[in-house]
Amino acid sequence: MILEGRTALVTGGSRGIGRAIVERFAAEGAKVAFVYHSNKEAADELIASVKDAGGEAHGFQCDVKSKAEADAVVEKVVEQFGTIDILVNNAGVVRDTLVATMSEEKWLEVIQTNLTSVYNFCNAVMRPMMSARYGRIINMSSVAARVSNQGQAAYAASKGGVEGFTRCLAVEVAKRKITVNAVAPGFIATDMTVDVRNAAEDKIIKEIPVRRLGQPEDIANAVLFLADERTSYITGDTITVDGGLTLGGI
């Protein structure tokens, strides 16, 4: 198993892409802690599902926007497992609104959930990872960081920030044998995209060269690749997983 003996922490882990990552990591032998915001039922169901499959997962309720709560979760995971080898910053929200009508509340919710949370958890895991002289940090970006869409100014800003943060942190911790990378999904079939899919799924698929929507497992596989100890020479990079959507070849 690729992650045998490793401990991982995944934010936004109870549904969608986060759930697929938790399941994939557990199947590869990792002890997986995950953070969820409020849906305890979904968290408990995931824990039971992973256990039934022979894996190990533990859920922690947390508002990822809060530095104090992020610190507390990391402290609990380290206390329980001894260290954190892998951090996946997956928590995110979409609140698409034109800038002219966007409230400060919506702006801050997106920036704090998608970007500030990445700082919160990266900062919290620095001490155990640096002490162990080992770590894999994978931050969730999006093709929206590089492709302009009306109504996505806040989301694009948050994901562009994630990619910039990823590059800078990678340089800071490289000597400690910690890699920091990002994954940028394209159009993935999750709860977050259900409204758009209901309105225009056929049109969207025609714009994707591989002619299908991405699945959460497609992203989980890319995250697993970056979490592997054998990818130690990849850092500060962003892997795009979009079926060719951003190639511009349609």
Image (tube, rainbow, N blue to C red):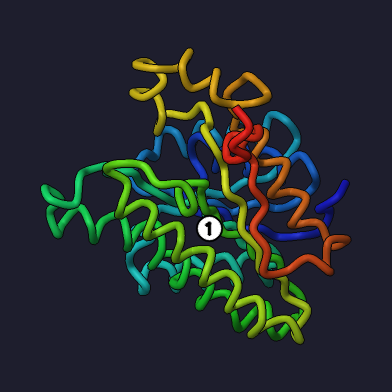
Q: Is residue 47 visible to the viewer in this orientation of the structure?
A: no
* Residue for point 44% across, 71% down: 120
In which quadrant of the rendered image does the C terminus lie?
A: top right
Looking at the image, is 189 positioned above or below residue 149? Answer: above
Position of residue 210 measured from the top left corner of the image (x, y, whole percent)? 68, 24
Image quadrant in which you'd find residue 88: bottom right
The crowd level at tag 1 (other Cα within 10 Å; few <14, some 14-19, many 20+) is: many
Residue bearing mark 1:
89
Position of residue 132 measured from the top left corner of the image (x, y, whole percent)? 75, 80
Q: Is residue 212 visible to the viewer in this orientation of the structure?
A: yes
Residue nearest the observer in this picture, 89 or 204: 204
Badge 1 element: strand
Position of residue 63 measured from the top left corner of the image (x, y, whole percent)? 34, 58
Looking at the image, is 95 positioned above or below residue 217? Answer: below
At label 1, the amino acid type is: Asn
* Residue for point 77% across, 60% down: 6
* Residue for point 61% across, 65% down: 80
In the picture provided, is 114 more to the left or to the right than 135?
A: left
In the picture provided, is 100 more to the left or to the right than 56?
A: left
In the picture provided, is 125 more to the left or to the right than 30?
A: left
